[in-house]
Amino acid sequence: MNRFLLFTYLAFSSVFLCCAPDNKNAVGTADWPEITPTSKPWTRWWWMGSAVDQQNLSSLLEQYQEAGLGGVEIAPIYGAKGYEDRYLDYLSEDWLEVLKFTVQKADSLGMGVDLTQGTGWPFGGPQVNLEEAASAMNIQDYEIHDGKRLSDPIIFQRRNENQPMAKLVAIMAYDEHMHAKEVTEFLKEDGMLEWAEPGNWNIKAIFLDKTGQKVKEPPLGE
């Protein structure tokens, strides 16, 4: 063995040996943190049509617990073909009864249960106003050549008449070397950008848009 490696090995061995007494504050001898349900992995648990029953719920939870899971997150959603006669209406008395059973069974196994805040995909409903609705970034590109001003107005291009007008967030100008400048302050009320500098520029108008998404395939009863 190389002398340097041998010396290093002996030095580290001496350190570990000298720090080995039954002192819980010693380096490397601290107690391992208590293992709790929240320190274990959890899984999303799709209830397709909520076609569930106590016998299968109990069996599955036992398998999940044996596999090392700390809990489940129930996501009730649209059903599976061929099991229509077993569907449980979301938030019905029968549905609430199996949910109660699931929580009690999981608790007896030392597991946790979580529930998604809504159903379907994405979440939503008539209680969501336009301001709080799902949003997205929409970028419109324009080109400026030879230091000339942009000839077209910067106006949000709607996909259809029913789409609300998006809110302008910023206008950024990028030169040929991708150096950026914010030029939002140069936009006039008519949409014309009264800004220009020598060279070629890529103008990006950034809008806060609405996705127009609605709840897709919610479970029965919603």
Image: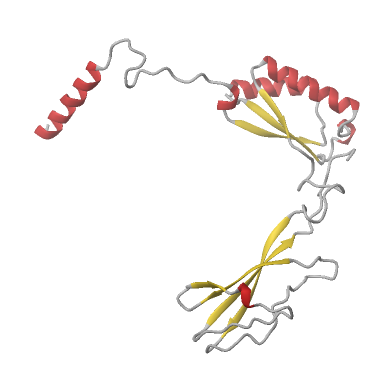
Q: Position of residue 95 (x, y in %)?
A: 85, 28
- On screen, residue 210 versus residue 88, left or right, reads left
- On screen, residue 69 versus residue 218, left or right, reads left
Q: Position of residue 67 (x, y in %)?
A: 58, 24
Residue at x 16% of width, y 24% of height: 10
| Front one among 82 and 154 | 154
| Front one among 207 and 95 | 207
Q: Position of residue 105 (x, y in %)?
A: 72, 18
Work out whether 84 lies above or below 61: below
Q: Position of residue 42 (x, y in %)?
A: 62, 31
Work out whether 132 lies above or below 222: below
Residue at x 60% of width, y 20% of height: 66
Work out whether 104 lies above or below 86: above
Q: Which quadrant does the C terminus fall into?
A: top right
- In this view, the residue farthest toward the left is 3
- Figure quadrant of residue 164: bottom right
- Figure quadrant of residue 61: top right
Residue 2 appears in the rendering: no
Residue at x 57% of width, y 21% of height: 36
Residue 50 appears in the rendering: yes
Q: Which quadrant does the N terminus fall into?
A: top left
- In this view, the residue farthest toward the top is 22
- Figure quadrant of residue 201: bottom right
